[in-house]
């Protein structure tokens, strides 16, 4: 298991660093980020629908459309302005993302009204559609919006945005790695025995420490936050903690659905959800802190 995690992790790191690094030269399209986020969110949506089973499963087509629509909404203001200059009036991305989310809520009601036959299921399915859209479409939007973070030096290639994306990815994932190895070596006191029996307080401390070190190191390679290393260390601690909460949140979903892993799509890690859970929760914190 450990050997599989190591080689698979190395592949994922290489793809991420290479793709995000190359993407900074392709503004405002950022095609690698678009394909990556869209693919991961759709795969995560599929895994989540499979976890839910058939009893209360909402419309798969609507769920996929909701997640994809929210991802696409992040690109509409800038790419739309490039393709159709003068046609896109308001370029505030959150207006587009918020509008897309509102459409999802309305569509969930309309679909259930059209298909309604037996009472007792519609409210559950509507709630699940909205929840999936928020979890896999709205939260990742905070991560995506780091791509358009203003550069302090007003460079044509936004290196600060690239560094911010790296921070949002690798700080919570370094926390995962730190928690895993520290827990294996020193773990004694269980943190959440019902949700995740293998997680310990010692592992959590090791994870936060790893996140702090990763944030300070990444900020020195390419300054992201103002205030030097103390500010970067605080950001690292915040991302480490919220990433841990995201990991536990996904454990809650799996335990509630009586499954150990979201799927077996990623050897050594489980499913795509098992890989991105900490990043999804840490994304809003990274966005507001760095912004």
Image (cartoon, rainbow, N blue to C red):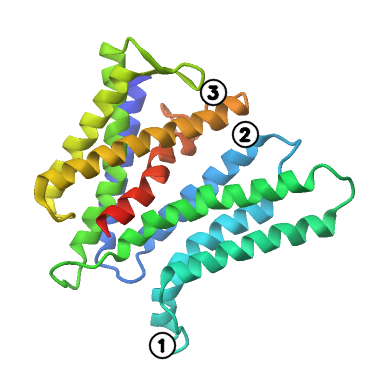
Q: Is residue 17 left or right of residue 101?
A: left
In this figure, what is the number of numbered marks? Answer: 3
Instruction: Give the residue pinned by disc 2.
Output: 51
| Residue farthest to the top, as pictured | 188
Which one is earlier in the sequence, the residue at label 3 or at label 1?
1
Badges 1 and 2: C-beta atoms under 8 Å apart?
no
Residue 125 is situated, as x and y percent measured from the top left of the image, at 72, 46
Instruction: Give the residue pinned by disc 1.
Output: 85
Q: CA distance from mark 3 to mark 2?
A: 10 Å
Q: Secondary structure at mark 3?
A: loop
Residue 41 is situated, as x and y percent measured from the top left of the image, at 50, 49
Which one is earlier in the sequence, the residue at label 3 or at label 2?
2
Instruction: Give the residue pinned by disc 3.
Output: 260
Please tell me which residue is depicted at 67% across the width and 48% down the height of the picture. Answer: 127
Badge 1, how many Cα within 10 Å: few under 14, some, many 20+? few
Q: Is residue 49 left or right of residue 71?
A: right
Quadrant of the rendered structure where residue 66 is? bottom right
Quarter in which the N terminus is drawn: top left
Q: Secondary structure at mark 2?
A: helix
């Amino acid at each position: 298991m450990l050997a599989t995690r190591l080689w698979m992790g190395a592949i994922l790191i290489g793809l991420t660093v290479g793709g995000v690094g190359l993407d900074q030269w392709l503004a405002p399209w950022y095609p690698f980020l678009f394909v990556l986020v869209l693919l991961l969110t759709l795969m995560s949506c599929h895994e989540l629908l499979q976890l839910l089973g058939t009893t209360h499963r909402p419309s798969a087509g609507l769920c996929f459309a909701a997640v994809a629509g929210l991802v696409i909404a992040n690109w509409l203001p800038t790419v739309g302005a490039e393709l159709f200059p003068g046609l896109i009036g308001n370029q505030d991305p959150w207006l587009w993302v918020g509008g897309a989310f509102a459409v999802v809520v309305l569509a969930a009601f309309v679909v259930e009204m059209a298909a309604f036959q037996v009472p007792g299921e519609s409210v559950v399915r509507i709630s699940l559609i909205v929840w999936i859209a928020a979890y896999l479409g709205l939260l990742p939007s905070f991560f995506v919006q780091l791509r358009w973070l203003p550069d302090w030096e007003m460079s044509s290639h936004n290196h600060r945005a690239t560094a911010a994306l790296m921070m949002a990815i690798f700080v919570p994932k370094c926390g995962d790695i730190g928690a895993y190895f520290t827990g294996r070596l020193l773990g004694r006191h269980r943190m959440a025995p019902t949700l995740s029996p293998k997680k310990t307080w010692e592992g959590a401390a090791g994870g936060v420490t790893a996140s702090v070190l990763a944030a300070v190191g990444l900020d020195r390679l390419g300054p992201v936050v103002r205030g030097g290393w103390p500010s970067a260390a605080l950001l690292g601690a915040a991302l480490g903690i919220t990433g841990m909460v995201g990991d536990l949140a996904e454990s809650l979903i799996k335990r509630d659905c009586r499954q150990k892993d979201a799927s077996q799509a990623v050897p050594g890690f489980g499913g795509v959800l098992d890989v991105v859970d900490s990043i999804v929760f840490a994304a809003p914190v990274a966005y507001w802190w760095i912004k």
